[in-house]
Image (spheres, helix red, strand yellow):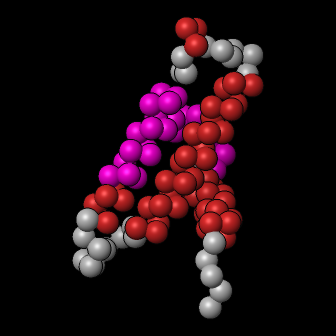
C-alpha cells in the first residue's frame, strides 16, 4: 500500500470542497453568505472543528457514528484554506486596508 502524504490529503480535500460547494451553494448562495461575519465566521467554524477533533481524540477507541477524526481534520483544512483565501481577497480588494488596520 502506498504511503499517504499531505499532498494526497490536500488533493482529496479539494475534491471534497468542490462536491460540498455544489450541495451547499449551488447557484443560490455565495460563500460570503455562509460566512457573513468575516473573520469571526471562519474562526467559529475552525473552532467547532477543533472541538470535534478534541472530542474524538479524547476517546480514540469508541465507535464514532458519523464524522471521523480524519473527516474532521479534512474539514478543518478546508475551512483554514477558505479563511486564507478570504483574507487574501480582502487584501486585494479596493477597501484594503480596513480602518485601524483591523480585519473585518
Q: Position of residue 13 (x, y in %)?
A: 61, 62
In this view of the protein, can residue 12 be seen by the observer? no
Please give the name of the residue rendered at 66% of the width and 39% of the height, measured from the top-left corner: 85
49 displayed left or right of 11: left
Residue 87 drawn above or below residue 56 = above
The front one of 34 and 40 is 40
Residue 41 drawn above or below residue 98 = below
The front one of 37 and 77 is 77
The front one of 101 and 48 is 101
In this view of the protein, can residue 32 be seen by the observer? yes
Q: Where on the picture, by quarter, is residue 33?
A: top right
Which secondary structure is most common in the magenta stretch?
Answer: helix
Residue 56 drawn above or below residue 83 = below
Query: Which range is magenta?
Result: 26-51
99 displayed left or right of 51: right
Q: Position of residue 98 (x, y in %)?
A: 61, 13
Residue 40 is a magenta residue = yes
1 displayed left or right of 68: right
Amino acid at each position: 500500500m502506498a504511503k499517504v502524504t499531505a499532498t494526497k490529503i490536500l488533493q482529496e480535500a479539494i475534491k471534497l470542497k468542490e462536491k460540498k460547494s455544489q450541495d451547499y451553494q449551488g447557484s443560490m448562495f455565495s460563500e460570503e453568505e455562509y460566512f457573513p461575519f468575516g473573520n469571526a465566521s471562519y474562526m467559529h467554524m475552525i473552532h467547532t472543528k477543533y472541538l470535534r477533533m478534541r472530542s474524538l481524540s479524547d476517546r480514540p477507541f469508541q465507535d464514532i457514528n458519523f464524522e471521523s477524526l480524519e473527516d474532521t481534520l479534512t474539514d478543518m483544512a478546508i475551512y483554514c484554506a477558505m479563511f486564507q483565501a478570504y483574507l487574501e481577497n480582502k487584501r486585494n480588494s479596493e477597501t484594503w486596508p480596513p480602518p485601524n488596520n483591523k480585519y473585518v
